[in-house]
Image: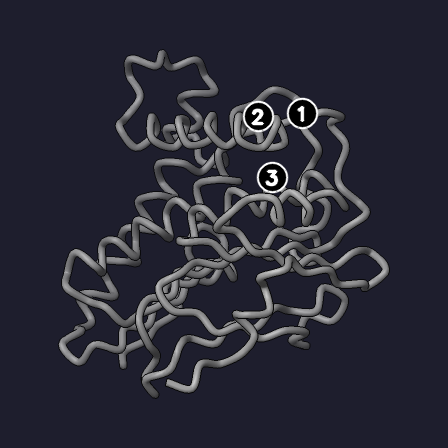
Amino acid sequence: MIQETRILMGMPVSVAIVDPEAKQEDLDAVFAYFASVDEQFSPYKETSETSAVNRGAPESEWSPEMRDVVELAERTLRETDGYFSVRTPEGAFNPVGIVKGWAIKHAADLLRGRGFKNFFVDAGGDIEAAGRNAEGRPWSVGIRNPFKRDEVVKTVFLSDIGIATSGTYIRGDHIFDPHTGKTVSDIVSLTVIAKDVCEADRFATAAFAMGANGIRFIEDHPGLEGYAIDRNGVATMTSGFSKYTLEPRN
């Protein structure tokens, strides 16, 4: 197995490939992709396309990637009753809330396109896990205690699936309810497991913005499972989440 971690998009990005034919150039390709996403979508870079959109660049000038991200954001807005937005309370366009999962999914597809079947791509704790780890088992992923970050409160076992967590314990209160413009305070962490990390990430962000009702939203949507921790440290999981906490025997 080859594995490496680099700081990109302002967070640690880790890639591991178990398939024996993997080479350093394969890792380099993934990291180069993340670097290009940062250059294109960062709202903090004057040269990014996001900044150009905020300066008024017409839709006719948008790249295919920007169109894809905006379409996904608009679909998420509809599917979550308006609880997801790529607009800040001040009205600026900021796609960060959806770009991370989208980028991880595309990075995983890059590896699949190179013929790899057993790997993981982790960006800031959001993960696409493919196949098996070096021991031939599903990948184990720990959900951190939001009140004590060096402690794992739950471990899940994943294969060919995505996981994403939204919370306030790393970046502080940065997720707001688009309906009120206020940050969420009644929950501190919400983890979602879905068919891929892009689905997990976009619904984790939206469900977190719903506050205490978010875990019910995840429960009511087929293909999603979730684990929420409220500000009092009480955890609530969806009815099917526990199947991921038991490591398969084969």
Q: Secondary structure at mark 2?
A: loop
The foreground one among 156 and 55 is 156
Mark carried by residue 184 = none
Q: Which residue is mark 1?
A: 89
Amino acid at circle 1: Pro
Q: Secondary structure at mark 3?
A: helix
Q: Quadrant of the N terminus?
A: bottom left
Count residues near mark 3 (Cα–Cα under 10 Å), then give few for <14, some for 14-19, many for 20+: many
Q: Is residue 11 above or below residue 181?
A: below
Drawn side of residue 114 relative to residue 70, left or right: left
Q: Which residue is mark 3?
A: 206
- Work out whether mark 3 precedes mark 1 in sequence or the reverse, and give the earlier one: 1
- CA gap between label 3 and label 1 equals 15 Å
Drawn side of residue 89 relative to residue 60, left or right: right
Seen at 43% across and 41% down, the residue is: 99
Q: Is residue 233 above or below residue 181?
A: below
Seen at 54% across and 28% down, the residue is: 77
Amino acid at circle 3: Ala
Q: Nearer the viewer, mark 3 or mark 1?
A: 3
Q: Secondary structure at mark 1?
A: loop
- CA gap between label 2 and label 1 equals 7 Å
Residue at the extreme right: 232
Mark 3 and 1 residues: CB-CB less than 8 Å, in contact? no
